[in-house]
Image (tube, rainbow, N blue to C red):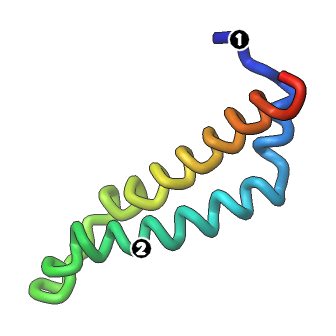
Amino acid sequence: MEIDRIALKRAITPPTLYSSLRIALVVGTILNIINQGTTVLAEGRLDIVKCVLTYFVPFAVATYSSYRAYRAGPGR
């Protein structure tokens, strides 16, 4: 698969990254509550690596989805 540089530039613009960040904050928070909620409440411990990954994955998926949408844009 060849990288579409125009679509990539659009996918990493501030508005698109801001949208991906908002999605990551909502989805990541929900997933952290599901995955670590009982541990945090019972033991007061939070696994930082899991926490960071839980926010990063939805951010990466949202940004990649934007890239794919721009790549498939009108007329392509």
Residue nearer the viewer, 20 or 69: 69
Return the disc, 1 or 2, that comes first in the chain's sequence: 1
Which numbered disc covers residue 22?
none
Crowdedness of circle 1 by 10 Å Cα count: few (<14), some, many (20+)? few
Residue 57, percent from left and from top:
46, 49
Residue at the (84%, 49%) spot, across then down: 13
Is residue 18 placed above or below 44 in the rendered structure? above
Image quarter where the C terminus lies is top right
Residue at the (38%, 58%) spot, across then down: 54
Position of residue 44 in the picture relative to residue 52 (left or right) = left
Residue nearer the viewer, 50 or 31: 31
Position of residue 33 in the picture relative to residue 29 (left or right) = left
Residue 41, percent from left and from top:
17, 88
Which numbered disc covers residue 29?
2
Residue type of the residue flagged with mark 2: Thr
Is residue 20 placed above or below 70 in the rendered structure? below
Q: What element carries label 2?
A: helix
Determine contact: label 1, label 2, CB under 8 Å.
Answer: no
Residue 33, percent from left and from top:
29, 76
Is residue 45 placed above or below 14 in the rendered structure? below
Say which residue label 1 marks.
2
Position of residue 70 in the picture relative to residue 27 (left or right) = right
Residue 31, percent from left and from top:
34, 67
Q: Is mark 1 on a helix, strand or loop?
A: loop
Considering every residue shown, the one lying at the far top of the view is 1
Crowdedness of circle 2 by 10 Å Cα count: few (<14), some, many (20+)? some
Residue type of the residue flagged with mark 1: Glu
